[in-house]
Image (cartoon, rainbow, N blue to C red):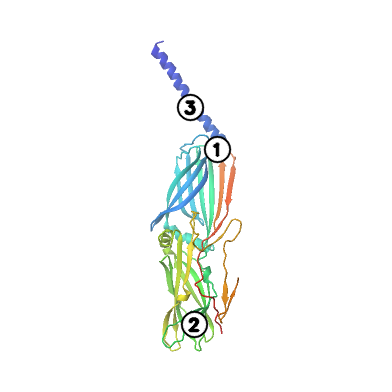
Amino acid sequence: MALNGVFAALTGGKVRTAVVALAVVAAAVGGAFALGVFGVPSVAAVNNSFGDVTNETTVVETDLVVSNPNPIGVGLDGVTVNYTVSMNDVEMATGGREGVSVASGNSSLAFETELANDAIPPWWTSHVENGERTTVTIDATVTAELLGRSANLTRTREIETDLIGAFTSDETRPVNADAPLVDDPVLYVNETRGRWGTVSDAETPIEMEFDVYNPNLEPYVVSEVGYDVTMNGVQMGSGSTEEAYLVPSYGTETVEITTALRNERLDEWWVTHLDESVRGHQVSDLRIEFYAVIELPSGESVTVPLDSLTYEETIETDIFDEGLDRSDETGNSTDSDGSDDEAGDGSTATADGSTADDGGSDDTTTSDEGTTDSNTSNSGSDDSNTSDGDSGDGDDGLLPLTVSP
């Protein structure tokens, strides 16, 4: 046999041996994965934050940590990562990636997803209908299609606000006509109440009541009460009553008015809510201003701004638990141990001016690893917090005063 032929035979044999060896190793590794000797990569953590915001879209930035428990990296074309962000079952953002390669240990994968701002109105509707509560749900899945196995992680967070709770008040406020030959105050508002009405796709109504007292010898007619609602300066709605109310001398009448937020403006408000330069990141100011048209005994009608009834409330959210700093702002939170951080006192006053003193985020993470061979392992961790997005201060500096016959 010629020397070249011998060399070719030897090298050819080595190549074939190497190929066979690699095939055996690959089969062994694949078989080890299939038999569960090696672990399937899973989702260790998922963190979201808001990025750039335009009038049409909001960028959701996601850092997803994939944990590979094996001593070698995994780079199979069949490995995919998918995630979904929902708020009260309203799908806000979805993303994913195919052909993921992960090293041994933890690997961080960055995603950017555009949230369409027109998803904000249906979420808002669900938030109000659910008692101003929202469950933020993040579902993430790593799937190895070749192995027929996947691992899931579900994380939930509870968001709660109280936009109109502080409108219910028994504080007495005077109504001054500021008109010639008229003794002020012409009326008193002794009590106010507010509650959400029936929400529709078009509007979010707030049903309000004012208990009005007339301290004069003559009856007064409130022919109209109007309102103007803004959120971070965005005009959300305006209107007025269609019914006149006669307030008898030394008597009380309840004036009813339904204010309505136009849901079509919510996506415009959303942009300001996330804009740091407006009120701060995820902070909004709800403001409702009122006016009344009062018919005087002389027959003259005057339009009176009801400045003392102007309602302001701060809306704060931390939807993705970004750890926003609220240390310098008023808010209520309940920790996982059930303790309530809220502290406060109240005072009441009688007509003679005397006073008497009365002296959350919920994070739940669930990780499920499923297999087609019924070999399932579950692991979970629960961190419970309740975050109250309400941080408004309903005290305008006036002591409550009740004026009655």
Between discs 2 and 1, the one toward the N terminus: 1
Instruction: Judge whether 222 appears above or below 112 on screen.
Output: below
**Picture disc at residue 22:** 3
Q: Which mark is residue 62?
A: none
Contact between labelled residues 3 and 2, with CB atoms less than 8 Å apart: no
Q: Which residue corresponds to mark 1?
A: 39
Q: Is residue 195 visible?
A: no
Q: Give x and y (percent) for residue 100.
A: 46, 40
Q: Residue 225 location, x and y as percent?
A: 45, 77
Q: Earlier in the sequence, mark 2 or mark 3?
A: 3
Question: What is the distance, in whole Å, between disc 1 and disc 3 at their CAs?
Answer: 21 Å
- How crowded pointer 3 is (Cα within 10 Å; few <14, some 14-19, many 20+) is rated as few
- Residue picked out by circle 2: 187
Q: Nearer the viewer, residue 388 or 145?
A: 388
Q: CA distance from mark 2 to mark 3?
A: 92 Å
Q: Amino acid at mark 3?
A: Leu
Indicate the position of residue 314 as horizontal and vertical percent values. 48, 65
* Gap between marks 2 and 1 measured at Cα: 75 Å
The structure residue drawn at horizontal position 48% and vertical position 37%, both measured from the top left corner, is: 103
Secondary structure of the residue carrying numbered label 2: strand
Residue at 43% from the left image edge and 58% from the top image edge = 274
Q: How many marks?
A: 3
| Label 1: element kind | loop
How busy is the neighbourhood of tag 1: few (under 14 within 10 Å), some, or many (20 plus)?
some
Residue drawn where x is 42% and y is 13% of the image:
6
Image coordinates for residue 208, horizontal then vertical, percent: 51, 73
Closest to the observer, 261 or 217: 217
